[in-house]
Image (tube, rainbow, N blue to C red):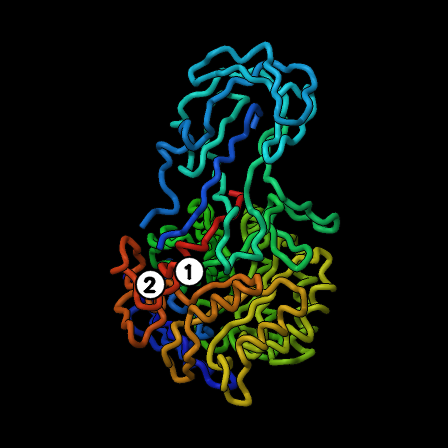
């Protein structure tokens, strides 16, 4: 039986202290430091178109409805479009307006097969919010029982079958917290299939196939803005059946790069299969889980270099997941407000790119991840040094932060985040805890205050952590969101978990939205 680490988040005011591992059965390391999604579904029909060895016992000393169902009834006529249509065989060029010209094909098929034809010939145009394409022949469509993921259906006119290829929920009427969010959905169809309305083009200097950054925002492989909203995961060997049900769109993993690549590969694949973006990060660089092998809160460049060495060695493992993964280079490494942080990461980024990592890199602030001045002062130089211009910066909110009336050594939540926002760089709040004075370096900043502050500034966020600890959770002292990894009802969640997941204004059930690239 694997031993699970108690990764309690306890913070010193100025830096986080690490207590070395103790041995208990396998490895049991104790660290200091630490409803439902109101989705507005739009029927985005594409009319008339081809359309989880040894336990990873240490995680970090830094720190209702199901989201994914079998989709047996997804893509039915009611969700795939008001009518199943056969596309006809072409037709003359239409006006692009409201008038459709009947084509010569599209006789009645298994669906309704009304035989409409956009009449746009070989090209395509947009009619209001509906993009029309060539009237290639179709069979009329079936009832859509072949839907893959049970989300909004659409009609695949090239096969005449209603399918639900993870069409994303609409944000036509976002909440106040989402006021700055892009219209993430609204599929449009082109002759070679369906794309996403409002998508931006990948910058020419970015040679990757996955997430990319442009204009200070993170976009998925389809060019759709992606707001990170999710959870951290301490234990790679602890089950997590409840996370997909929370609508979390990202899991931040501590990956054991010292093990064979298939271990990390399984973590990535399991996340992708659940349609959750995996953010792979390094906490430890050896399975001893000794302080000497921990990058967290270290300030010497040797620790960062070791982490990058391991990333380089595992480049082939992660290359195949480039479309879907984010790479968190080193958890909470680096000195605060320092050119050492800047220069070491400029070197690290160059090495990662040379090894073939073309996707988005995530770089934590120094000062145990909590130092806003690192990012506000030096992050732009790191970003500009990157040949791919594809970096997200990560700041953690614990005892070094206050929400008004703090000590002189604390960063005020709002003014600190404003200084980060002013960089126009993509920023996430990659860790925060339950507040309530939990931990030796307590904070009274509530999860809701952190999330709201992030959302109003267009920043992503990740709660710490789903499984800290993985079992025997004490709701009064621990940081876990789930008591045992499950989420079948509110009873499975701690006070912290209920707030992060189920709050009707800012909870994951309400705000979580998956990437369109799955």
At a point 30% along the width and 56% down the height, the residue shown is: 486
- Residue 289, by quadrant, is bottom left
Residue at image x 39%, y 33%? 74
Tell me if 357 is positioned left or right of 438 in this view: right
Q: Which quadrant holds residue 95?
A: top right
Residue 158: x and y, percent? 55, 22
Return the x and y of residue 376 as percentages of the image width and height: 65, 74
Q: Position of residue 222 (x, y in %)?
A: 60, 43
Image quadrant occupied by the N terminus: bottom left
Q: Quadrant of residue 350?
A: bottom right
Label 2 sits on residue: 498
* Residue situated in front as seen by the camera: 130 or 331: 130
Residue 467 at x, y percent in the picture: 35, 64
| Residue lying at 56% horizontally and 37% vertically, measured from the top left | 187
Q: Give the camera-side residue of 254 and 87.
A: 87
Mark 1 — residue?
505
Q: Nearer the viewer, mark 1 or mark 2?
A: 1
Residue density around tag 1, few if under 14, some if 14–19, many if 20 or more, within 10 Å: some
Residue 439 located left or right of residue 122: left
């Amino acid at each position: 039986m694997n031993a699970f680490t108690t990764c309690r988040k306890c913070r010193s005011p100025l830096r986080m202290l690490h207590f070395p591992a103790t041995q208990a059965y396998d490895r049991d390391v104790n660290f200091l430091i630490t409803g439902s999604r109101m989705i507005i579904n739009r029927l985005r029909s594409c009319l008339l178109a081809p359309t989880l060895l040894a336990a990873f016992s240490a995680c970090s000393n830094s720190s209702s409805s199901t989201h994914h169902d079998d989709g047996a009834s997804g893509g039915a006529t009611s969700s795939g479009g008001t009518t199943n249509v056969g596309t006809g065989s072409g037709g003359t060029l239409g006006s692009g307006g409201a008038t459709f010209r009947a084509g010569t094909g599209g006789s009645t098929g298994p669906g309704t097969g009304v035989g409409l034809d956009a009449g746009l010939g070989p090209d395509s145009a947009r009619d209001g919010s509906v993009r029309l394409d060539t009237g290639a022949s179709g069979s009329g469509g079936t009832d859509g029982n072949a839907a893959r993921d049970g989300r909004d259906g659409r009609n695949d006119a090239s096969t005449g079958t209603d399918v639900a290829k993870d069409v994303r929920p609409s944000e036509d009427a976002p909440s106040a917290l989402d006021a700055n969010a892009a219209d993430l959905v609204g599929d449009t169809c082109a002759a070679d299939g369906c794309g996403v309305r409002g998508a931006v083009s990948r910058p020419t200097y970015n040679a990757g196939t996955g997430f990319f950054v442009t204009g200070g925002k993170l976009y998925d492989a389809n060019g759709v803005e992606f707001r990170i909203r999710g959870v951290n995961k301490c234990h790679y060997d602890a089950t997590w059946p409840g996370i997909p049900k929370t609508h979390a769109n990202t899991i931040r993993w501590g990956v054991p790069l010292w093990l064979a690549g298939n271990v990390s590969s399984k973590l990535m694949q399991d996340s992708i299969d659940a349609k959750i973006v995996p953010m792979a990060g390094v906490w430890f660089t050896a399975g001893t889980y000794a302080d000497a092998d921990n990058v967290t809160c270290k300030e010497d460049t040797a620790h960062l270099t070791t982490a990058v060495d391991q990333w380089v060695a595992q480049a082939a493992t992660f290359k195949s997941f480039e479309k879907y993964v984010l790479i968190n280079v080193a958890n909470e490494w680096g000195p605060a407000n320092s050119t050492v942080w800047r220069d070491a990461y400029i070197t690290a980024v160059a090495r990662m790119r040379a090894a073939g990592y073309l996707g988005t890199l995530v770089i934590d602030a120094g000062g145990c991840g909590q130092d806003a001045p690192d990012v506000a002062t030096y992050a732009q130089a790191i970003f500009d040094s990157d040949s791919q211009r594809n970096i997200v910066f990560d700041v953690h909110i614990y005892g070094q932060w206050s929400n008004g009336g703090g000590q002189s050594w604390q960063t005020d939540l709002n003014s600190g985040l404003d200084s980060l926002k002013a960089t126009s760089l993509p920023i996430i709040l990659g860790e925060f805890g339950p507040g309530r004075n939990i931990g030796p370096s307590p904070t009274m900043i509530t999860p809701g205050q952190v999330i709201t502050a992030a959302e109003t500034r267009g920043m992503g966020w990740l709660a710490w952590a789903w499984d800290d600890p993985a079992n025997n959770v004490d709701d009064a002292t621990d940081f876990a969101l789930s008591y045992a990894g499950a989420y079948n009802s509110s009873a499975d969640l701690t006070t912290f978990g209920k707030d992060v997941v189920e709050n009707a204004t800012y909870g994951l059930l309400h705000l979580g939205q998956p990437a369109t690239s799955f």
